[in-house]
Each structure stands twice: as structure tokens, then as C-alpha cells.
Image (spheres, rainbow, N blue to C red):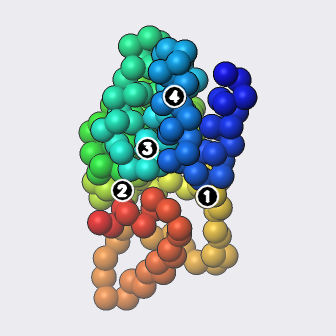
Amino acid sequence: MRGLFLLGRLRIVQERYADARCIYDWLLHKYGDRTETLLNLAKSYDMLCFWDRSEETYRRVLDKEPDNVKAMLGLSTIAVQRHDPATVHEWADKALAVQPGTIQALSNKAFAYLQDRDFGNGWPLYEHGAGHLKYRQVRSYIGEPRWQGEMGEDVRLLVHSEQGIGDQIAE
């Protein structure tokens, strides 16, 4: 069992989520609802954009372990993908109540604020998370002031794109 579990983790790291899903489905069928197996299966579903299945699987974890922060963060992240800011805040706040300062929860809240065009709350949280999450590098443009949401004829805005979920904020 341990070997297959680790093979599934390797497939997730290799971004071979369909392979990981098959492995974790089989492990659940053979050995039952083990928390780490469920979490990895939910992650696989999430990365395959099977958000209903991912949500259902994270909820199975929470049925067993109501304070499981990984499952709460997973549900918050799915809500970001679905552009559902209220649900993002609900699950991120629950995760923060159990584990204060959780960077992923704060970053998810940033995305939710930005989706709601609440730039005053969104950008500071986004910048905080940008320095701590994998694949998020803080880019500093020395000497250039940060945009605070002001509008006007003489306002110029540099839009810097990134690979990932940030591109979906404007959708």
C-alpha cells in the first residue's frame, strides 16, 4: 500500500494527475477512507478541474476530521476557481481559525477580494502571499509607486502578467 501511495504522490509532483487519481481511487477501494489518500485524491480531482468530485472528497475528509486544515484550504481553493468569493472567505476563515496565519488561506482571500474588486484588501494580502507561496515571486519595480485604485487621465498602470490563477482575476 505504501509503495502505491508514494507512486501517487510522485505522479502529483510530476503533474500526472489522471494517473494519481487512478492510484488513489484504487487505494480507497482496497483500503477504505484514509485521510491522506482522500486528500491526495481530492487534489488530483482539483487539478483535473473535476471540482464537484474534489469538493465531495474534501468534505469526506471533514466528515472524519472536522478541523482538517488541508481540506478547508482545498475547498477554499475550489471556490477561487469557481469565482465564488463568499465561499472562499468561509473556508479560508475556518482554516485560519484552526491554524492562524496560514499563507494559502490568506492568498485565497486575496483572490476573492480581487474578484470582488476590493483592491484595498486584496492587493496587500496578495503581495503577502506572493512572497510565500510556491511559484509566486514578488516583483519589485524600484521607484514606481504602487497603484491604489485611483483613476484619472494622468494615471498610468503597468500590468504585469503571471502564469497561473492570477490571470483569472479579471475574468
Helix, strand, or loop for circle 1? loop
Question: What residue sits right under mark 4 in the picture?
Answer: 26
Q: Position of residue 35 (x, y in %)?
A: 53, 19
Q: Please say if the residues under marks 4 and 2 sit with CB atoms less than 8 Å apart.
A: no
Amino acid at the residue labelled 3: Asp
- The answer to whether 144 is drawn above or below residue 162 in the figure is below
- Distance from the alpha carbon under mark 2 to that under mark 3: 21 Å
Question: What residue sits right under mark 3 in the picture?
Answer: 46
**Which of the two marks, 2 or 3, is nearer to us in this view?**
3
Identify the residue shown where x is 45% and y is 59%: 165
Amino acid at the residue labelled 4: Trp
Q: Indicate the quadrant containing the N terminus: top left, top right, bottom left or bottom right.
A: top right
Identify the residue shown where x is 58% and y is 51%: 16
Question: What residue sits right under mark 2 in the picture?
Answer: 114
- Distance from the alpha carbon under mark 3 to that under mark 4: 18 Å
- The answer to whether 106 is drawn above or below residue 66 in the figure is below
- The answer to whether 169 is drawn above or below residue 74 in the figure is below
Left or right placement of residue 74 versus residue 140 in this view: left
The foreground one among 2 and 152 is 2
Q: Please say if the residues under marks 2 and 1 sit with CB atoms less than 8 Å apart.
A: no
- Distance from the alpha carbon under mark 4 to that under mark 1: 34 Å
Amino acid at the residue labelled 2: Leu
**Which of the two marks, 4 or 1, is nearer to us in this view?**
4
**Which of the two marks, 3 or 4, is nearer to us in this view?**
4
